[in-house]
């Protein structure tokens, strides 16, 4: 099997695939005015996705995370999951969702082949959740997690973006929530994008502040699996759940990068904050184009840089995280 490897020797078993840039939430750190511009109807077709993932699987990708926007807004979502699941070499199909109607639909997701679910819950307070997301749907999301456990899900990952004025004081509530549940709660450091500079300046909270609180309370860092995401995970013997920290402003954050991204329009994004995407869509029109597609991907990987330059205020072409799914 061919293996994707860049000039720094980093390998890439993990692909994040956006299947739409449309989102129906209005999170204040991402789309405070709602999704005004999107290319939902021009998104990759199911056949194009099959060809894309088949090529990446031949290059050593084992894990695919389906993202958006909100990926479940695609009416073919379950078809996309089952298609990817059947591709030889793909071991894990994960998804990231805002939890919209999750309580009603999670059973169909699991039947389609979803292996792992990340869901965003930025506050466990209903009023705080509504303030952040623009929707009074916290209980709906929590019910979705409960339903998932009833259906046999071994655990969930829950994403919460750290913000000074919204949830920075809610760590005790989150810890109490995961004490008896197999939930990995991932605190994500707020990232600056092209459209949120003022909000970032007001709300950014360094993830190291949470790390210090955890270490002082007996939490211990876990060794990361080769196909894991960017979170540094911590466990505590008194808790069933775990804590993950995603701290993109840490100086060594990019050293062990193992993931690539493809946009809903078929552009390979070498970094979340890359200046441009590299088009693959013209080579997704027939199965006979696989050799050329594989060669193009391998050539583009050599353009991947050693870091993202976020600490210098560079946000590349990422205006909002909904463009490429974070």
Image (cartoon, rainbow, N blue to C red):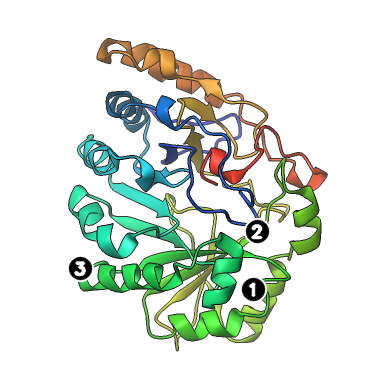
Reading the image, the residue beneath label 3 is: 151
Alpha carbon of mark 1 to alpha carbon of mark 3: how far?
Answer: 30 Å
Reading the image, the residue beneath label 2 is: 247
Q: Residue at x 42, y 49 (%)?
A: 227
SS category of the residue bearing label 3: loop
Q: Residue at x 37, y 69 (%)?
A: 140
Tell me if label 1 and label 3 are in contact, CB under 8 Å. Answer: no
Alpha carbon of mark 2 to alpha carbon of mark 3: how far?
Answer: 32 Å
Residue 67 is situated, as x and y percent measured from the top left of the image, at: 43, 45
Q: Nearer the viewer, mark 2 or mark 3?
A: 3
- Considering only vertical position in the picture, is 55 above or below 121? above
Q: Is residue 124 visible?
A: no
199 with respect to 256 (left or right): right
Number of residue marks: 3
> N-terminal of the two: label 2 or label 3?
3
Residue 246 is situated, as x and y percent measured from the top left of the image, at: 59, 59
Q: Quadrant of the N terminus?
A: top left
Alpha carbon of mark 2 to alpha carbon of mark 1: how far?
Answer: 16 Å
Reading the image, the residue beneath label 1 is: 167
281 with respect to 268 (left or right): left
* Marker disc for residue 273: none
């Amino acid at each position: 099997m061919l293996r994707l490897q860049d000039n720094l020797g980093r390998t890439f078993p993990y692909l994040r695939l956006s299947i739409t840039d449309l989102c129906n939430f209005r999170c204040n750190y991402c789309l405070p005015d709602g999704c005004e511009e999107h290319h939902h109807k021009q998104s990759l077709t199911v056949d194009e996705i099959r060809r894309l993932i088949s090529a990446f699987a031949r290059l050593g990708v084992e894990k695919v995370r389906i993202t958006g926007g909100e990926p479940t807004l695609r009416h073919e979502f379950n078809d996309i999951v089952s298609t990817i699941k059947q591709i030889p070499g793909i071991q894990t199909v994960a998804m990231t969702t805002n939890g919209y109607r999750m309580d009603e639909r999670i059973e169909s997701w699991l039947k389609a082949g979803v292996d792992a679910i990340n869901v965003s819950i930025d506050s466990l307070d209903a009023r705080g959740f509504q303030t952040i997301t623009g929707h009074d749907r916290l209980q709906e999301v929590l019910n979705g997690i409960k339903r998932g456990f009833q259906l046999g899900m071994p655990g969930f990952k829950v994403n919460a973006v750290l913000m000074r004025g919204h949830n920075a004081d809610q760590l005790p509530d989150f810890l109490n929530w995961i004490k008896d549940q197999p939930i990995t709660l991932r605190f994500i450091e707020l990232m600056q994008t092209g459209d949120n500079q003022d909000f970032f300046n007001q709300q950014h909270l360094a993830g190291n502040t949470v790390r210090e609180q955890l270490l002082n309370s007996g939490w211990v860092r876990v060794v990361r699996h080769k196909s894991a995401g960017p979170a540094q995970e911590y466990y505590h013997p008194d808790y069933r759940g775990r804590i993950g920290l995603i701290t993109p402003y840490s100086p060594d954050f990019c050293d062990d990068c193992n993931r690539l991204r493809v946009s809903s329009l078929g552009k390979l994004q070498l970094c979340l904050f890359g200046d441009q995407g590299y088009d693959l869509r013209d080579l997704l029109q027939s199965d006979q184009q696989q050799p050329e597609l594989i060669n193009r991907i391998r050539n583009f990987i050599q353009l991947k840089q050693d870091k993202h330059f976020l600490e210098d205020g560079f946000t590349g072409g990422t205006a909002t995280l909904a463009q490429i799914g974070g």
